[in-house]
Amino acid sequence: MCQLQWTFAAIVLLNAAPQTTLAADAPPYRIVDGKVDDATYRGWLAYHSACHTCHGVDGIGTAVAPSLVDRVKDLRPTQFAAKVITSYRIVIQSGELSGDDNTAIRQRFAEEVMREERAAQGELLMPAWEQDEKIRPRVLDLYAYLRARAAGALGPGRPQRMKAPAAKSE
C-alpha cells in the first residue's frame, strides 16, 4: 500500500474506531497513587524514543520545537494521531480549492506551502511517523502520556507503572 493510501486508511480507522468505554470527558490515561497505567507508560517510552530530542524532556518544548504539553490540551485523540502520523501533511484533491465555502482548506494549503518553503530553507521540520513501527502503533499511548502531562496529573520524569492486578484463583 502506498504511503498516501496508508495515511488515509489510518485516519479513517482512527476516526471510525470506537472510543473507549469511558465517559466522553474522561481522561485517556489512568493514574493511581502516582503510578500510570500501561498505555500511559508506553506513551512515555514512545515519547522518549522519538520525540524528546526536539520537543524536550517531558514534552515542555525547546528552541527547536514547541511544547507538546501545551499543544495537546486542545486536541482530540484523532486530531493528535492525524498530526503525528502525517506530520501536518495536507493532501488536497484537485478542485477543492475553488468555491467560496472552503476557507479552511485554503488556509491549510497556505500553511503547507509555507512549511515546505521553510524546509527548503533548511529549517528542521517534524517528520511523519506513519512508517515508523515504534511510533505508529503507539500514537494513542503517546497521546495519553502527553494529556496526563498537560493536565498536571503526571509530573516530569519517568513515571512509575501500576502493577498488573493479580489473577483470580478459582
Image (spheres, helix red, strand yellow):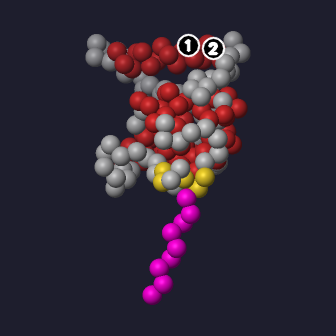
Chief secondary structure of the magenta span? loop
Which structural element holds mark 2? helix
Which structural element holds mark 1? helix
Picture residue at 61% right of the left edge, 52% below the top: 160
Distance between the Cα atoms at labels 1 and 2? 6 Å
Read off the residue under disc 1.
114
Depth check: 127 or 158 in front? 158
Q: Any magenta on residue 164?
A: yes
Contact, mark 1 vs mark 2 (Cβ under 8 Å): yes
Q: Residues within 10 Å of mark 1 (few under 14, many from 20)?
A: few
Picture residue at 54% right of the left edge, 15% below the top: 113
Q: Position of residue 109 (x, y in %)?
A: 46, 18
Q: What's under tag 1, amino acid-wise?
A: Met
Left or right: 97, with 82 as reference point: left
Depth check: 103 or 50 in front? 50
Left or right: 165, with 116 as reference point: left
Picture residue at 50% right of the left edge, 16% below the top: 111
Q: Is residue 142 visible?
A: yes
Picture residue at 46% right of the left edge, 36% below the top: 151
Q: How many marks?
A: 2
Q: Position of residue 161 (x, y in %)?
A: 59, 56
Quadrant position of the C terminus in the picture? bottom left
Q: Residues within 10 Å of mark 2 (few under 14, many from 20)?
A: few
Q: Which residues are magenta?
A: 162-170
Q: Any magenta on residue 7?
A: no
Q: What's under tag 2, amino acid-wise?
A: Arg
Disc number placed over residue 37 in the picture, else none: none
Left or right: 12, with 126 as reference point: left
Read off the residue under disc 2.
118
Q: Is residue 1 visible?
A: no
